[in-house]
């Protein structure tokens, strides 16, 4: 803790840096390939958990039932989740009742939309009426809300079937700690590896094929980091596109909520089904003429970029360029001002949420959570106000970066999933948070699978846009997914010949 607090002046110093882009080249070492038409690649066959889109079509055509899909998920959770620890609560009885009701409505022709009868899971930070919601902490071991979060109400209205509540880093802020009473969720690609924070259970459950759709929260990368480390798609939408009403807060200024799924198309379908997106605006665009900006300081020249992350970025840029997109370098302030602004705002606001509770129940918190929240006690009112002002300047710079670009392409994470034992409590104070810029700007940012590391772990890239351009970002993500097919697509050991999702 002493070392972390000693960096406070350094963080505040980053708030006063000139917001000038680096002089580096984020595409250093990349050569534009000659344009060449690409044929979209169909999804892998034989994987037991199909996409949300495929399930929705099967339900619509009478080829399966909501109950059969629910039983598929419950069977796979029972079979595979023990070592993963991705679920904190499995709502089997509730799910079966919801699925049976969905089947009655579907048989009667009362289809509510593409999520009607589709199983999904929630990060355990969303309130669910009558269902325990712990936010990953022993402090809330017996907490049962009486009202659904706004997103849960939307999903209920859409006819989706809740399968259970997923592991989260404690209060959406703790690390992969083992002294907090729950979790941590493990990475299905290699169990000792970090599954990301804080929506770790969501990434693990999607990657292992336990559920087709999940929702998490993202304050500084908590949807996108699990997505890229587990090889799935994860969207942090524009701020307030999905209400955080009924989500336990970490930072009310920066909290977002968003979907994780196997594909960007499934994320788009989910948002459209709950009325947050016009699905047609999220269709994959023509690559020809698509302007893709790669910002300085956020690509191959990112201070913490692993060679495998750079390789994946270059592969994505090449695939888009071959298909006819224009790849160009754009100016964006360095990561440190974005990251420092995030750390100060989250630290200050997180302490305000937890100070009284920590005083009363501090021993029930995991040690990492106590330290990270305690750091916020050293953020002064002046530093917080300074960070709020800096956020306005950084947001303006983000918007300006899209003057000549439709979407922005960056590395998806600094590198492949590290070992959980190597994730230090204050790692994010030692190097800038790659994901923080989009949270500061309140802008849409999507991670999709783009490659495989030399160790056989998934690697992602990130696409982002102006605030409100969620459809454009999701469309570009679907285009990129149609051009890339990393191998292997799924972690070994999670196949299941017993496919029970057909009637």
Image: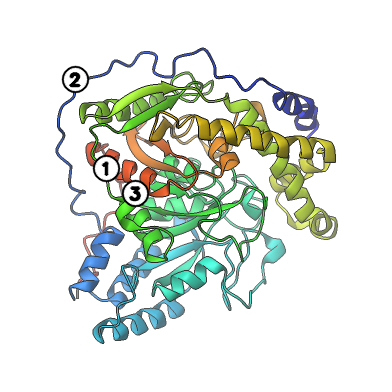
485 to the left or right of 404: left
Please name the residue that numbered disc 3 is placed on: 264
Residue 69, position in %: x, y?
30, 71
Residue 453, position in %: x, y?
36, 30
Residue 39, position in %: x, y?
14, 38
Tell me which numbered mark, 3 or 2, is placed earlier along the sequence. 2
14 to the left or right of 176: right
- Picture layout, residue 173 above or below residue 419: below
Please name the residue that numbered disc 2 is placed on: 34
Query: Of the residues tagged 1 and 3, which is closer to the observer?
Result: 1
Q: CA distance from mark 1 to mark 3?
A: 13 Å
Tell which of 235 and 472 is nearer to you: 472
Residue shown at 70% from the left, 51% from the top? 366
Residue shown at 21% from the left, 69% from the top? 58
Q: Residues within 10 Å of mark 1 (few under 14, many from 20)?
A: some
- Picture layout, residue 156 above or below residue 45: below
Quadrant housing residue 429? top right
């Amino acid at each position: 803790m002493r070392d972390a607090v000693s960096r406070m002046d350094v963080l505040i110093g980053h708030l006063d840096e000139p917001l000038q882009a680096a002089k580096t080249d984020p595409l250093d070492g990349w050569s534009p390939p000659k344009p060449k038409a690409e044929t979209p690649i169909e999804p892998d066959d034989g994987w037991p958990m199909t996409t949300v889109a495929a399930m929705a079509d099967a339900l619509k055509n009478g080829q399966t039932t909501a109950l059969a899909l629910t039983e598929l998920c419950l069977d796979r959770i029972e079979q595979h989740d023990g070592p993963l620890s991705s679920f904190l609560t499995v709502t089997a009885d509730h799910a079966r009742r919801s699925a049976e009701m969905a089947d009655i409505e579907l048989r009667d022709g009362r289809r509510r939309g593409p999520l009607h009868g589709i199983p999904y899971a929630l990060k355990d930070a969303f309130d669910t009426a009558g269902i325990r919601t712990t936010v990953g902490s022993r402090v809330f071991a017996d907490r049962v809300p009486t009202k659904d979060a706004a997103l849960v109400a939307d999903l209920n209205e859409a006819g989706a079937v809740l399968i259970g509540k997923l592991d989260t880093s404690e209060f959406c802020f703790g690390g992969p700690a083992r002294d907090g009473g729950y979790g941590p969720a493990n990475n299905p690609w290699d169990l000792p590896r970090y599954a990301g924070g804080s929506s770790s259970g969501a990434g693990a459950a999607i990657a292992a094929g336990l559920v087709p759709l999940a929702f998490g929260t993202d304050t500084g990368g908590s949807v996108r980091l699990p997505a890229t480390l587990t090889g799935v798609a994860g969207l942090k939408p524009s701020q307030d596109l999905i209400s955080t009403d009924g989500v336990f807060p970490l930072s009310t200024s920066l909290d977002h909520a968003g979907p994780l799924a196997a594909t960007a198309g499934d994320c788009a379908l989910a948002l459209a089904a709950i009325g947050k997106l016009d699905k047609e605006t999220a269709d994959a665009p023509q690559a020809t003429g698509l302007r893709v900006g790669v910002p300085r300081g956020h690509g191959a020249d990112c201070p913490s970029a692993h060679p495998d992350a750079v390789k994946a970025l270059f592969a994505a840029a090449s695939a888009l360029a071959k298909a006819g997109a224009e790849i160009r370098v754009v100016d964006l302030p360095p990561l440190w001002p974005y990251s420092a602004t995030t750390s100060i705002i989250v630290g200050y606001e997180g302490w305000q949420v937890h100070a009284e509770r920590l005083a009363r129940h501090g021993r029930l918190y995991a040690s990492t959570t106590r330290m990270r929240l305690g750091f916020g006690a050293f953020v002064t009112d002046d530093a917080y106000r300074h960070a709020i002002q800096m956020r306005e300047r950084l947001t303006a710079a983000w918007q300006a970066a899209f003057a000549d670009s439709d979407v922005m392409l960056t590395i998806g994470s600094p590198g492949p999933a590290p070992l959980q034992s190597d994730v230090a409590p204050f790692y994010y104070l030692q190097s800038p948070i790659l994901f923080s810029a989009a949270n500061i700007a309140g802008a849409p940012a999507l991670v999709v699978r783009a490659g495989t590391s030399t160790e056989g772990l998934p690697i992602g890239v990130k696409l982002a846009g102006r605030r409100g351009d969620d459809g454009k970002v999701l469309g570009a993500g679907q285009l990129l997914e149609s051009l890339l097919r990393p191998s292997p697509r799924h972690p070994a050991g999670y196949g299941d010949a017993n496919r029970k999702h057909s009637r």
